[in-house]
Image (tube, grey):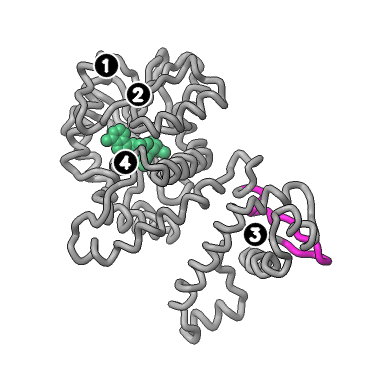
């Protein structure tokens, strides 16, 4: 965790004797920038399974030792690096969450996070006007090399998030016996489809997305050798008709992290199209940041609140369970259930077509 308070810090802060707002800024954004820099330098992978002296590490990373030492001091204070007798090694947190070799690595999401921070420069405008202050990255010109780099960071970040959240979500998804077809709405990197295809080896998944998302998904499919099970269709979810393209034959649909991008009427319209291509008895699985889900996790609530602020800037928001349930029921779904997840900030909702 970036801010690790000592007992004395904690007591003084709870007595309101410390200027706590100065921890939130500039201290936390400063630690965040240090962490992003360390990931971009590949510092944690360089320390994988070994400890190095400052000079050795500086040589590997092509850095000046005096500059690197300042970065390392913050990483040690923040708990990402340990230092003993002049040698540096990864902490437990870094080994589990930041190493490329770890199945739980969120390093690509850390590297993508400055793109999210950049959106927040438009927060005052969005708060004042309650209108989108900038476009979603998907609406930018995909031919622009800077947009291509940003989207590549975005999809890599989302795929790494899937490696953490996906295990829990996929464990909770139970497809009916004999289910063989899945449609993954805006599934891009295809990481969730890939996990479900491994859980259900007879499943055929169809991922619908724009071309840059599909390019990310094709890399997943190639790495995991799932090209016989996962297929892609380039489509505009909002504008294109589904029924002409697909017969109503899907056993299940994933609607993961799509709702927060859209306005309520757009969600209703898209869900209507998705549900129309499900078989009777077919299931939809919906994952998103749902407000007010937990009283016990302040982190989870703050993450959802920040996501709602971020989405407000680009024309979306986070929706409560009652609203999602209403959309699903009005589109002909029943048995709408929410499933709490341990991973903070996400909720799974499932429903069945009548
Ligand atoms: C927030 S991402 C979610 C990706 C994935 N489902 C997940 O949970 O990680 C939203 C996805 O919707 C796709 N998308 C956004 N607008 C779209 C549109 N109009 N047509 C097709 N795909 C779209 C994006 O490319 C992206 O893959």
Q: Is residue 268 visible?
A: yes
Q: Which residue is mark 3?
A: 80
Magenta span: 82-96
Give the number of the mark in front: 1 or 4: 4
Q: Which residue is mark 2?
A: 183
In the rendered image, the vertical position of residue 343 relative to residue 277, given as above or below: below
Q: CA distance from mark 3 to mark 2?
A: 39 Å
Horizontal and vertical percent for residue 45? 68, 48
Q: Which residue is most to the front?
A: 144
Q: CA distance from mark 4 to mark 3?
A: 37 Å
Q: Earlier in the sequence, mark 3 or mark 2?
A: 3
Mark 1 lies on a secondary structure that is loop
Give the number of the mark in front: 4 or 2: 4
Q: CA distance from mark 3 to mark 1?
A: 48 Å
Q: Which residue is most to the right?
A: 85
User: Quadrant of the rendered structure where residue 74 is?
Assistant: bottom right
Residue plotted at (76% across, 56% down):
59
Residue plotted at (40% across, 54% down):
116
Q: CA distance from mark 2 to mark 1?
A: 10 Å
Residue plotted at (35% across, 51% down):
293
Q: Earlier in the sequence, mark 2 or mark 1?
A: 2
Horizontal and vertical percent for residue 310? 33, 56
Is 85 magenta? The answer is: yes
Number of numbered discs:
4
Identify which residue, 77 or 120, lies in the foreground.
120
Q: Earlier in the sequence, mark 4 or mark 2?
A: 4
User: Quadrant of the rendered structure where residue 3 is?
Assistant: bottom right
Marks 2 & 1, CB-CB < 8 Å contact = yes
Marks 4 & 3, CB-CB < 8 Å contact = no
Q: CA distance from mark 1 to mark 4?
A: 28 Å
Mark 3 lies on a secondary structure that is loop
Q: Which residue is mark 1?
A: 246
């Amino acid at each position: 965790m970036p801010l690790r308070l000592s007992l004395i810090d904690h007591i003084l802060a709870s007595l309101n004797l410390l200027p706590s707002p100065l921890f939130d800024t500039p201290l936390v954004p400063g630690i965040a920038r240090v962490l992003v820099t360390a990931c971009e330098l590949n510092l944690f992978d360089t320390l994988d399974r070994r400890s190095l002296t400052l000079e050795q590490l500086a040589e590997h990373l092509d850095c000046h030792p005096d500059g690197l030492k300042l970065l390392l001091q913050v990483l040690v204070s923040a708990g990402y690096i340990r230092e003993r007798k002049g040698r540096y090694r990864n902490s437990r947190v870094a080994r589990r969450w930041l190493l490329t070799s770890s199945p739980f690595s969120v390093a690509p999401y850390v590297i993508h996070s400055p793109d999210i921070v950049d959106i927040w420069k438009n927060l005052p405008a969005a708060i004042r006007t309650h209108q989108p202050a900038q476009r979603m990255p998907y609406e930018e010109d995909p031919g622009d090399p800077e947009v291509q780099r940003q989207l590549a960071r975005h999809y890599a970040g989302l795929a790494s998030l899937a490696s953490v959240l996906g295990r829990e979500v996929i464990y909770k998804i139970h497809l009916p016996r004999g289910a063989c077809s899945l449609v993954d709405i805006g599934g891009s990197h295809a990481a969730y489809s890939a996990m479900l295809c491994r859980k259900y080896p007879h499943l055929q998944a169809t991922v619908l997305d724009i071309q840059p998302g599909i390019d990310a998904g094709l890399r997943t499919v190639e790495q995991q050798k799932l090209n016989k099970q996962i297929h892609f269709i380039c489509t505009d979810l909002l504008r294109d008709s589904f029924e002409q393209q697909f017969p109503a034959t899907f056993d299940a649909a994933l609607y993961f992290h799509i709702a927060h991008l859209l306005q309520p009427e757009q969600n209703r319209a898209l869900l209507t199209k998705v549900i129309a291509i499900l078989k009777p008895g077919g299931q939809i699985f919906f994952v998103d940041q749902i407000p007010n889900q937990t009283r016990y996790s302040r982190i989870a609530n703050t993450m959802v609140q920040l996501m709602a602020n971020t989405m407000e800037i680009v024309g979306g928001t986070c929706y409560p369970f009652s609203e999602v349930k209403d959309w699903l029921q009005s589109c002909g779904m029943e048995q709408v259930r929410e499933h709490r997840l341990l991973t903070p900030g996400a909720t799974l909702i499932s429903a069945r077509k009548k």
